[in-house]
Image: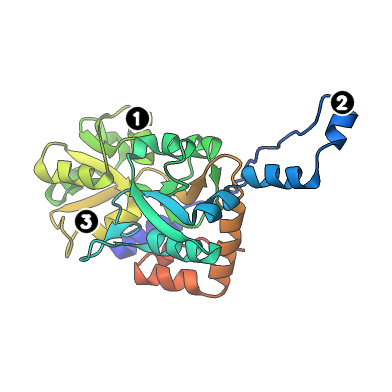
Amino acid sequence: MKKLITMLLALTMVFSLAACGNSDNAGGSDGNTADSKTESQEEDGAASDSDMAYVKDKGTLVVGITEFEPMDYKDENGDWIGFDADMAKAFAESLGVEVEFVEIDWDNKIMELEGKTIDCVWNGMTLTSEVTSAMECSNAYCNNAQIVIVPSDAADKYQDKDSLKDLTFAVEAGSAGEQEVSALELEYTAVKAQSDALMEVASGTSDAAVIDSLMAAAMVGEGTGYADLTYTIGLNSEEYGVGFRKGSDLAAALNDFFAESYGDGSMIEIAEKYGVDAAIVEQS
């Protein structure tokens, strides 16, 4: 299975994504009013627009996640671990703040960000056009694909997209998987999480699911909790990124952190711990 997952990931294309920032226009009603601003006031205004300053002032980086092995999941003690979770902990430490993980409804991730209930979305998030237009996103750090999950004894029947047309699917609401099945005009039910989509197939409520290939490698097939399920075809190729509020200066800070951690080997070391090292995108 891992060999096929690696093959799928090797087919992914690296997209160049430009983060779009907001520019603030400052000015008074006339030249004298503008000149009357003190240096202190200007500094205070700059600080109030900085997500970095906001996070450091409150002392926590609040990370929005869902249960998504091997990126974010709980260990036997109930603590959040995974590649994304460990990287988020390291990034927060580099900022001098604590990390706090908050489970969110994936379909509401943009609203959670804008309402400041979380500071970022860091959960194997695919860099779709919807995401990049609504969030300030980091550089891509991981390759992925959306793949079809079916019962193992039916896998031979579903080896191309045409064979999927009569199946009912379970997909995570607001996910890249939902976008793929919707684009193919397939019948589907939106559920809260990708893990719920797997349960739908295992219970026979849905014929198939579409989930991330990295999750499938960890949770589907021999030696996993879903030994009777397998994957057949990949529907796309994509990349993961971290999303912040639009205009946030934390995105650039994370890009610098990614480059540093890739350069010193710590990113790859964490990736190897969770078996995702073949999917890591080179950082510079």
Of the numbered discs 1 and 2, the one sitting upstream in the chain is: 2
In the picture of the structure, the residue carrying the numbered disc 2 is 30
In which quadrant will I find the N terminus? bottom left
- Disc on res. 182: 1
Give the Cα separation between the discs numbered 1 and 2: 53 Å
Q: Nearer the viewer, residue 151 or 172?
A: 172
Mark carried by residue 220: 3
Could you tell me the amino acid type at mark 2?
Answer: Asp
- In the image, is residue 170 above or below residue 222? above
Q: Which numbered disc flags the more N-terminal residue, 3 or 1?
A: 1
Mark 2 packing: few (<14 Cα in 10 Å), some, or many (20+)?
Answer: few
- Residue 103, given in percent of the width and then of the height, sits at 32, 47
Residue at 33% over, 34% down: 181
* Mark 1 residue element: helix
Contact between labelled residues 2 and 1, with CB atoms less than 8 Å apart? no
**Amino acid type of the residue tagged 3 in the rendering:** Val
Could you tell me which quadrant the C terminus lies in? bottom right
Judge whether 93 appears above or below 141 on screen.
below
Q: Secondary structure at mark 2?
A: loop
Residue farthest to the left? 203
- The Cα atoms of the two marked residues, 3 and 2, are separated by 65 Å
